[in-house]
Structure formats: C-alpha cells, structure tokens
Amino acid sequence: MKQYILFSNLVIISLSLQAQEALYIKSGTAITIQHGAVVSVKGNLTLENGSTLTNQGAIYIGNTAPGTGHLTDLSATGGTYGTGRFIFNGTGNQTISTPYTFSRLEVNGGSLELQSNISAQKWYLQKGYVTTGSFTAIATDPSALAVEADPANPNFSQGWINGTLRRYITPAVVSSYQFPVGSTTRSNIAVLNNLNTDPLTGLTYLDISQAPKPGTDAGLIITEAGTHYVSVAPEGVWYISSDAAPAGGKYDLSLYFNGFAGLTDNLFGILQRPAASTNGADWVRPAAALATLNTPGRTVAGGFASRHGLASFGQFGIGLTASALPVTLAGFRAFRLNTAVVQLDWETATEQNNKGFDVERRWQTETSFKAVGFVPSGAPGGASNQLLRYHYTDPNNYKGISYYRLKQIDLDNRSVHTLIRAVKGTGENGVTVVLWPNPNKGQFSIRIDGNTQRLPAYITDLNGRTIQQVFITENTPVNVNGLTAGTYIISIPDAFGPGEAFREKVLVVR
C-alpha cells in the first residue's frame, strides 16, 4: 500500500469504486492537508494506529458504492485533526470511528452512523441524519452555534441527530441551546432557553435524545388549569440528562412536535417523569409555568410545547388534556334523612354551558346505575361564576347500601360523571362516609357519621399493597397527608356494619 504525503491542492481519488479502501494511511506516516487544499476521498479513509492526519483544509469523504465512504481511525489514543473541515457527502450510509476530535464535522449525504463516540468542536448539518446507536455525538465547543443547520436545512428538517447529542454548555454566557434530535424519519428539536436569567450551575454538559414513548398511559392522573391530562403523545419523548445534577438555576424548555397528531390549541403541555420510567402514573406536572394561552408554546401553529422555569431533568413528554370541564363541583354529599328518604346536597363554584344534573343511584345488589331524578342548572343560561347550591331528596327505603352519583349534562348533551357517595339504609341512624376533596393534591379528609365504633381505614395502591392505615371515629375528620400522585383505594371494612365495607377510589394529582 502506498503512503501519501498530501500538499496544497492535491486531490486523491480512488481509481476503482470497488476497492475496499480508497486511502489507507499506514503506521508511522504523517499526512498534512495544508490550508486551502481540498482532498476528495471517493471511498474509505483508514488510519492505522501510529499514523497521524493533520487537516488544515477540507477532506470530502463519500461514494455511491455500498460499503464505501467510511472513516476508521485505529489510533489507540486521541488528539485533534487540526482546524480543517471533514465533509461526509456519500449518498448511502457512511460510518465513522475515531478517538480523535474534529474541528468541524459536516454531514451532507444520506446518513452517518457512529461506531464510537464522536467529538467535534462544531457539527454542521446540511443533509442526512446522524445515527448514534449506543454512542454519543459530542459538541465540545459551548458556543450557541456549535451545532448549526445549513440554510438548506431550515429548522434541521433535512439533517439532525438520530440518537444522543451531547453539548457542553455555559449558561451564564449563552442564553439558548438547540438540540436537533429525532428519529430516522424526522427531527424533534429540544431547545433550552432563557439560561441567562437564573443560570444553571454545577454541570458541564447535557445529553438529549428523542425516542418513542415507552409504556402506556395507565395511571396518568394530572390536572392543570382546570383540565385533566388524558394521555401523553405516543410519537415521542425527550430524555435530558447532565453530567451532574444542577446545584441551582432554571431554564425554559421548548419541545418541537414535528409529526405529532391529535394536538389542539391550548390543550397540551410538557409533563415530566424519571428518565427510566415506563409507568404512566409517574408523570407529573413540573413546577414550571405553561406559555400564555394562544401564544407559541400553546398553539399547534407554533410547532412546539413549552414550559418556563424548569429546574431538573428527566424524561419529558407532551401531555394532552381534555376540554375544560363545564362545571367545577365544590362538594357533593349524600345522607339518610330517615328510613324512607336520602338527601343529596352539592355545590358548584363555576358553571358554563350547563343544562343540569341527573341524579343516579345503584343499590348494593345492582350492577349498574340508573337515573332517579333531574335537577336543572340554577345558572342563567347555564353559566355562573358564583357558588350555587343544589338539593335533591330521593324516596329510598332500601335496607342495604345505596350508591349515588351525579351526571352533569351540557346544553349540547355531553355529560360527565362525579365520584360516588354511599349511604347505609338502617333507619334514621344510618351511616354515611364522606371523603373530600377528591381529586386532591396529596391531602384529604375522611369522616364517618352514624357509626360510633373506632374503625380502621386502609389506603392501598391498585396492586392491593397497603400504603397507610388510619382510624376513623364518628364525626371526627381524619386528615391524610403526603401521598404521591396516583390512584388509591380507600376501604373501611365494617363501615356500614359487620362485613359491609366502604370502598372508593381517591385520586392524587399534582
């Protein structure tokens, strides 16, 4: 194999496209590409351990033939390749493996696959995605444009990182960093903004990647601004980690949802959970503000979701909310007036487009609820911002346990059910159990009326594991504190008499 010393304006072109290597640099050879020189390697570029390549000009690596256009540096230790450009412009999939650091690495071809961690002071992306696999694409320069898109690559739509991108950061100096990460089909950029206001401290670099959402939405229970999150977009989540946990500071985060379906203006927001989690119950609403309604960050046309003032990292997804509930229920109680009548009382804090309420009842021996009455909205036109109180009396001499719920009905006949209340049918001294508020933020109260015994109440998770035990005394509220977000079961085994239990779900939201 010949050894080449390359000087200004010398171009090396493979004479045979079928050659395994177009340029092979043997151990002991030192090659310099002088400033202003352009070298085109129409095949593979391989360096043996002990050889050196100093590039002050430009080296193009690429070919249309399968299995060519790769850079493999077999050096045992790393260094730098000089201040020149390396341009990967092959039309197929190219590979790269080296311990050395590039000054400027450009991608303008089909795709580039990393076979080791690859470091460059600057990544310049024009066309084609970079697949990192188990490795990392590293931008060592902390400047804002250390990862830059060519004008022919607007918003990194033609070239991006398919895998993990590491960027060294200086938050006190640079206010914004783009991480053009995505899949093999599209980019979904993550942007950290507003880093100067309260700079992150205690960390040197960030690793960010994007991948399909793992797991399901089972257990997702989060409310925000009066609405409930019902799912997390399945098209992808973002993983953000750092070399060390932030000692302080905050940042704004924007996540671009290119290729996401089912988003509606103002009905989405960024949620967070631990990086390794696949559990829908682990999603939480970060202690950070959403963007203003109808502005970029909340609109589909804006192209991204955003939150302001985050302080930690992890796994981030775009949660989708249901439309705002038309009625805010402030309370709902059911109790037995006498052996023949049960009374229901409830209040609303706000109403909009509300027709009224079906009162629904299920007896202990029945499997489904049925409507027993209707109470129209007390709000003019179904809209109110004042506290409104409602009452309904149900002729009920049933001796077992009666369960009640309300069905709120819109003017356009859409409906929403409340939670269930239970009443014992043993006469005027019947037993009622009240649990409020529900949903709650990790603190709620339980009260039992009509049973003079001191009764144990068990709080379990959905797997039946006991989380907490408390004791209930008649007419005395018991406060429960400190539960994390999730769904729990509250059971009082003998609430309505021996063997007659009270059971109800309680929702803890953040």
Image (cartoon, grey):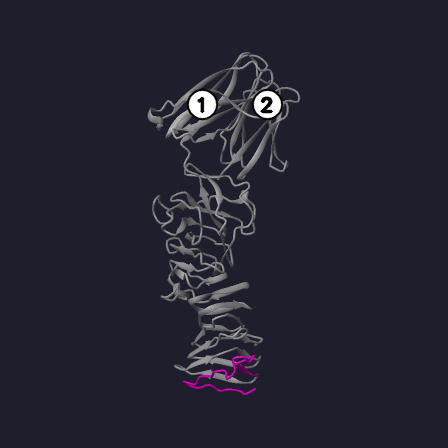
- How many numbered marks have been drawn onto this rendered protein structure? 2
Residue in the picture at 53% in, 49% down: 274
- Label placed on residue 53: none
Q: Position of residue 417 (x, y in %)?
A: 48, 29
Amino acid carrying label 2: it is Glu
Instruction: Please report whichever mark, 2 or 1, sits nearer to the chain's N-terminal start.
Output: 1
| Frontmost residue, 64 versus 407 | 64
392 vs 504: above or below: above
The amino acid at mark 1 is: Trp
Residue at the spot x=51%, y=59% of the render? 243
Front position in the image: 282 or 9 = 9
Instruction: Residue 304 in the image: state x and y as whole percent.
Output: 40, 51
| Alpha-carbon span between mark 2 and mark 1 | 24 Å
Does residue 112 appear to the left or right of 291 in the view shown? right
Q: Residues within 10 Å of mark 1 (few under 14, many from 20)?
A: some
Report crowding for label 2: few under 14, some 14 to 19, many 20 or more residues within 10 A (C-alpha): few
Give the labeled residue for mark 1: 346
Relative to 11, 276 lies left or right? right
Quarter holding the N terminus? bottom right
Q: Position of residue 321 (x, y in %)?
A: 44, 41
Q: Which mark is residue 366?
A: 2
Closer to viewer: mark 2 or mark 1: 2
Residue 145: x and y in percent read 39, 65
Magenta span of residues: 1-26
Magenta residues: mostly which secondary structure?
A: loop
Q: Is residue 433 visible?
A: no
Is residue 324 visible in the rendered image? The answer is: yes
